[in-house]
Amino acid sequence: MSQPAFTIGYGGRKPDEFARLLTDRGVKTLVDVRLRPDRASVGTYAKAKEPDKGIAGLLAKAGVGYASLPELGNLFLDYGDWPERYEKFLALAAPVLFDRLEAITGPVCLMCAEKKVCECHRRHIAVHLEKTKGWTFTHIE
């Protein structure tokens, strides 16, 4: 992938600020990597049934596409050693996990809830794609 890619967490961000951070960087598609995007604690960031509501509606108003890839969600969040488990998961299942991601129009931005990338599994996705696919990520914090 020759174009830039990004990651972002919505935690503690106002919707307008969140959308602006994406558009200012030229993001074409936000890729939701939450395991359960329909269960966001803040309704604005939930995946709604109607495309004009929730996170997809917010992004559409800003001209940014939305794709939900729950297969990239963190299955191991309740484990103390979740980072190690998640990295093993990526290493074993990468060909199956990333086939949909590679077909999405970029620049893309991987999104989860945690504002700080160091606390989130999206960092592990980014590192894996940098090492195996040559992607280049900027973490929006």
Image: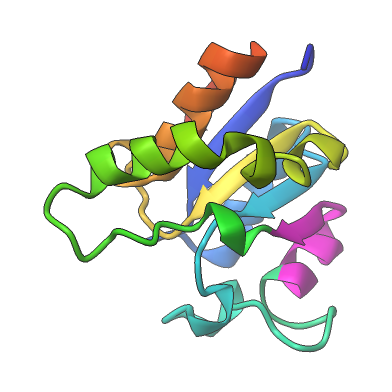
Image side of residue 83 versus residue 26, left or right: left
Residue occupying the point 63% across, 45% down = 97
Q: Residue at x 59, y 58 (%)?
A: 71
Above or below, comparing residue 110 to residue 39 in the picture: above
Residue at the far front: name it: 92
Is residue 135 among the parts visible in the rendering?
A: no
Residue 78 is situated, as x and y percent measured from the top left of the image, at 21, 66
Q: Quadrant of residue 107?
A: top right
The residue at the point 66 percent across, 27 percent down is: 5
Q: Position of residue 82 (x, y in %)?
A: 23, 49
Task: From this view, report whether residue 77 is shown above or below residue 130.
Answer: below
Q: Is residue 131 left or right of residue 115?
A: right
Q: Is residue 101 magenta?
A: no
The magenta segment: 56-68
Which part of the image, by quadrant, shows the N terminus? top right
Q: Is residue 61 magenta?
A: yes
- In the rendered image, the quadrant that contains the C terminus is top left
Give 93 or 69, whichever is nearer the viewer. Answer: 93
